[in-house]
Image (cartoon, rainbow, N blue to C red):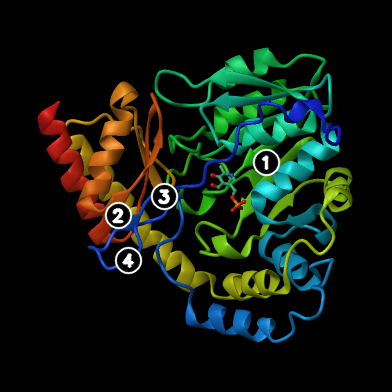
């Protein structure tokens, strides 16, 4: 008989990371499976990270003071409304620890970010999954109707991973007005910087007069720091304080903190790269539509093809062409927008596949 483990862990789905590109001497392959930023670190960001590495015999600044001060200024929010974590998925897990346990319910759209069911189940709470609409968008009306007195937290992933679709200001504000004030609404804005639709609201503006709204942001995507693990939340004091309590002590390394500060200071250069990726996203979406595919309008750094039973076959065809995409078996494929050469290979593979349909 082994140690007694919590029953809720039984059947927790394991997080599937995007498959890496093939290593070795064969032809170059590209990883379009994890919504990463394809650009290498900016020289200034790399330098400050390397400098921080010189003292990794020391614990990092536990309060992330430098980063907090920078974020506070950048977003015009008090530092007491900020909390950091090991990526925004770390902060999301802290949010669940702070709000939900056995007998409670957590609502989110489905399909959405695959960490939501995992971290919800680990908390002991139950997941309530509300299907996306036929247009692959959050059904905010159905989500509002799914709220019960057991609901503790609702995730709204905007843009949604893996579909790239968004909810806009009027519908989101109406939804927030309907949700009871004792339910925390988490606006997961991991891909915020890729949005070009002016009707999509900035969660940081929505949270200001709504104490039950928390905004999640990350340095992993637009800022290109996925490997360093740093994300943050913007929320009113009680929620932000609860996040600081549930944080793993010293979870965010000094390398990550210094890289995040350097990234905020190099924002203009980083956002130029984001612009280039947005241009590529729009090119890829248009080319796929031209080929006859149905592509939901993406405001993120990836596009979604609902391939159903052909999903695995399509992913294999892409891989043979040199690009690794992210299949969700039986549902569809999420394709990260990468460097132009990678996107061209993807478009070639998609066109050939389309002709065989
Ligand atoms: C919607 C969404 N939220 C959060 C994350 C977590 O990112 P990180 O933990 O790297 O900040 C991801 C990553 O894929 C995501 O797609």
Precedes in sequence: disc 1 or disc 3:
1
Res 286 label: none
- Quarter of the figure that contains the N terminus: top right
Is the residue 168 above or below the residue 346 in the image? above
Question: Of the residues under marks 3 and 4, which one precedes in the sequence?
Answer: 4
What is the distance, in whole Å, between disc 2 and disc 3 at their CAs?
9 Å
| Residue at x 29%, y 51% (from the top left corner) | 323
| Circle on res. 301 | 3
**Mark 4 secondary-structure assignment:** loop
* Alpha carbon separation for disc pair 1 and 3: 23 Å
Mark 4 = which residue? 24
Would you say the residues marked 3 and 4 are in contact, meaning their CB atoms lie under 8 Å apart?
no
Q: Position of residue 142 (x, y in %)?
A: 59, 15
Q: Nearer the viewer, mark 2 or mark 1?
A: 2
Kindly identify the residue that appears in the image at 64 percent across and 24 percent down: 175
Residue, disc 2: 280
Q: Is residue 201 above or below residue 167?
A: below
Q: Which mark is residue 206?
A: 1
Label 2–label 3 contact, CB within 8 A: no
């Amino acid at each position: 008989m082994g140690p007694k483990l919590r029953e809720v862990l039984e059947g927790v789905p394991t997080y599937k990371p995007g498959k890496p590109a093939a290593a070795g001497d064969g032809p170059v392959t590209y990883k379009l499976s994890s919504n990463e930023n394809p650009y290498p670190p900016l020289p200034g960001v790399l330098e400050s990270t390397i400098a921080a590495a010189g003292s990794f015999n020391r614990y990092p600044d536990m309060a992330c003071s430098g980063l907090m001060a920078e974020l506070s200024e950048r977003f015009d929010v008090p530092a007491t409304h900020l909390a950091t974590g090991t990526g925004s998925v770390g902060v999301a897990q802290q949010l669940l620890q702070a709000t939900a346990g056995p007998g409670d319910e957590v609502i989110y759209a489905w399909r959405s970010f695959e960490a939501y069911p995992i971290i919800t189940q680990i908390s002991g709470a139950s997941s309530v999954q509300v299907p996306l609409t036929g247009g692959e968008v959050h059904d905010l009306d159905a989500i509002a109707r799914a709220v019960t007195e057991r609901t503790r937290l609702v995730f709204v992933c905007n843009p949604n991973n893996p579909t790239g679709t968004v909810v806009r200001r009027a519908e989101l504000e109406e939804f927030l007005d309907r949700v009871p004030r004792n339910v925390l609404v988490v606006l997961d804005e991991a891909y915020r910087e890729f949005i070009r639709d002016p009707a999509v609201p900035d969660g940081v503006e929505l949270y200001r007069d709504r104490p039950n709204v928390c905004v999640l942001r990350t340095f992993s995507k637009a800022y290109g720091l996925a490997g360093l693990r740093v994300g943050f939340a913007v929320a009113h004091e009680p929620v932000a304080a609860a996040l600081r309590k549930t944080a793993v002590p010293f979870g965010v390394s000094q390398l990550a903190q210094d890289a995040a500060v350097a990234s905020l200071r190099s924002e203009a250069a980083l956002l130029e790269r984001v612009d280039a990726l947005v241009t590529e996203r729009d090119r890829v979406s248009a080319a796929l539509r031209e080929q006859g595919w149905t592509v939901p309008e993406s405001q993120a750094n990836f596009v979604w093809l609902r391939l159903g039973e052909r999903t695995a076959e399509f992913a294999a065809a892409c891989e043979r062409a040199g690009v690794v995409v992210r299949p969700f078996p039986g549902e569809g494929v999420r394709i990260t927008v990468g460097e132009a050469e990678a996107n061209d290979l993807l478009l070639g593979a998609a066109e050939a596949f389309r002709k065989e349909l």
